[in-house]
Image (cartoon, helix red, strand yellow):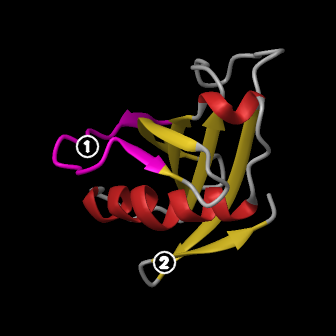
Amino acid sequence: MALALLLLAGCRSEEMRLPSGVVAERGEVLMEEQPGGEVWLILRVIAPALGSRAPSAADTGALCESWGVEAAGAAAVAPDQIVVQMMSEWVERGQPAPGITQVFGGYRFQDGTCIWEDF
């Protein structure tokens, strides 16, 4: 699986208040080629309040439509899917993290927008 870090040096905001009231901090954006050949953009954000507040589907959608679409537009290859990963604390990608709240949302990236998909 090819993995590349996408740098977001020119991006504007580093924090965002989400529809649920949770504040998310931009973490990292990764491009991953999946075994079937699809390219996924993984948007990883830290939201410390996840441990005490329930996020909504609107939260991952807002992150996809803002930071996800922005990162997809800056990518050398347009992603097939944008995966939003919200974490209450930083977790290394692919590592187990018992006790750390994580929320995932998957979106098909089509015509410059995010379309929710159950994955």
User: Residue 44's x, y, as percent?
Assistant: 52, 38
Q: Is residue 44 above or below residue 17?
A: above
Q: Secondary structure at mark 2?
A: strand
Mark 1 = which residue? 8
Please give the name of the residue rendered at 61% of the width and 27% of the height, measured from the top-left corner.
48
- Image quadrant assignment for residue 3: top left
User: Residue 118's x, y, as percent?
Assistant: 81, 64
Magenta region, residue range: 1-16
Mark 2 = which residue? 113
**Three-letter residue code for mark 1:** Leu
Kindly give the residue lying farthest to the left in the view shown.
10
Judge from the rendering whether residue 25 lies leftward or rightward of residue 105; answer left or right. Answer: left
Say whether disc 2 or disc 1 marks the residue closer to the N-terminus.
Answer: 1
Quarter of the image for the C terminus: give it.
bottom right
In 3D space, how far apart are the residues under numbered discs 2 and 1 (Cα atoms)? 19 Å
**Three-letter residue code for mark 2:** Thr
Badge 1 crowding class, 10 Å Cα cut-off, few under 14, some 14 to 19, many 20 or more, is some
User: Residue 79's x, y, as percent?
Assistant: 46, 61
Badge 2 crowding class, 10 Å Cα cut-off, few under 14, some 14 to 19, many 20 or more, is some
Asked if residue 15 is among those painted magenta in the image, a careful observer would answer yes
Q: Nearer the viewer, residue 1 or 90?
A: 90
Please give the name of the residue rendered at 23% of the width and 51% of the height, measured from the top-left corner.
12
